[in-house]
Image (tube, rainbow, N blue to C red):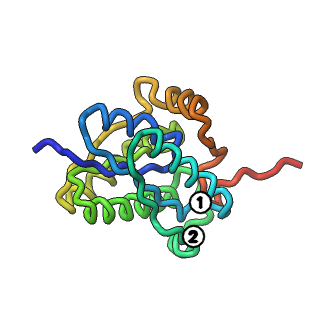
């Protein structure tokens, strides 16, 4: 069965540009989904949320926003605070985001789900896709198994986000990834 409606988990607006366009070009009805509880501080969340809203308008689509609950996110990952970037804390964070997105995909009766997480050269696409496949298989919907940064996808996301004037963040989003000030 060919999917008709896909939920795209958008980790941020810049990274969602390429997958959103490709999925639409492939004939899918795309619903954007932004989790955001992992983003600190609240003003950073607001900037990213506004950028996702702008992208949805640009794409002529809709976007759903999960409730912003950073305290809940923190309670779930705090025990991994000492983990390095890309380690177990990140894997748990991705799982929390994709589980939340999957719940929304099921509510909206989507028959496929994708994530923009694999646009970033700083994230492990094999781990992310394995997680997405497992979650979607258990729920009975199709996982769109892509590494969006391939074929110049990351460079295109940078170029297009600049052209569209979208906010481009300087760190992953979580409190543990906020760049330390020099001096």
In the picture of the structure, the residue carrying the numbered disc 2 is 70
Q: Position of residue 44 (x, y in %)?
A: 66, 56
Q: How many residues crowd around disc 1 within 10 Å: few (fewer than 14), some, or many (20 or more)?
A: many
In the figure, residue 148 lies in which quadrant?
top left
Residue shown at the point (33%, 54%) measured from the top left: 131
In the picture of the structure, the residue carrying the numbered disc 1 is 39
Is residue 108 visible from the viewing direction of this image?
yes
Say which of 165 and 44 sits in front.
165
Say which of 93 and 61 sits in front.
61
Instruction: Determine contact: label 1, label 2, CB under 8 Å.
Output: yes
Quadrant including the N terminus: top left
Say which of 153 and 134 sits in front.
153
The secondary structure type at the circle numbered 2 is: helix
Where 91 sits versus 2, above or below? below
Where 59 sits versus 180, above or below? above
Disc on the earlier residue, 1 or 2: 1
Task: Answer left or right for 9 relative to 138.
Answer: right
Residue shown at the point (61%, 36%) measured from the top left: 165
Q: Real-space Cα distance between discs 1 and 2?
A: 7 Å
Q: Position of residue 38 (x, y in %)?
A: 55, 62
The secondary structure type at the circle numbered 1 is: loop
In the figure, residue 74 lies in which quadrant?
bottom right
Residue at the right extreme of this rendering? 183
Is residue 127 visible from the viewing direction of this image?
no
Q: How many residues crowd around disc 2 within 10 Å: few (fewer than 14), some, or many (20 or more)?
A: some
Residue shown at the point (20%, 55%) measured from the top left: 141
């Amino acid at each position: 069965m060919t999917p008709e409606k896909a939920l795209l988990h958008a980790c941020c607006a810049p990274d969602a540009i390429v997958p959103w366009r490709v999925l639409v070009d492939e004939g899918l009805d795309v619903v954007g989904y932004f989790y955001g509880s992992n983003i600190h501080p609240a003003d950073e969340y607001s900037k990213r949320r506004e950028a996702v809203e702008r992208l949805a308008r640009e794409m002529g689509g809709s976007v759903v926003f999960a409730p912003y609950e950073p305290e809940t996110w923190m309670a779930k990952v705090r025990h991994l605070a000492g983990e390095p970037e890309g380690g177990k804390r990140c894997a748990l964070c991705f799982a929390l985001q994709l589980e939340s997105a999957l719940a929304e995909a099921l509510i909206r009766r989507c028959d496929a789900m994708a994530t923009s997480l694999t646009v970033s050269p700083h994230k492990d696409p094999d781990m992310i896709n394995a997680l997405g496949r497992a979650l979607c298989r258990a729920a009975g919907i199709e996982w769109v198994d892509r590494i969006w940064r391939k074929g110049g996808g990351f460079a295109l996301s940078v170029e297009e986000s600049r052209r569209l004037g979208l906010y481009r963040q300087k760190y992953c989003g979580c409190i543990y990834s906020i760049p330390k000030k020099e001096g």
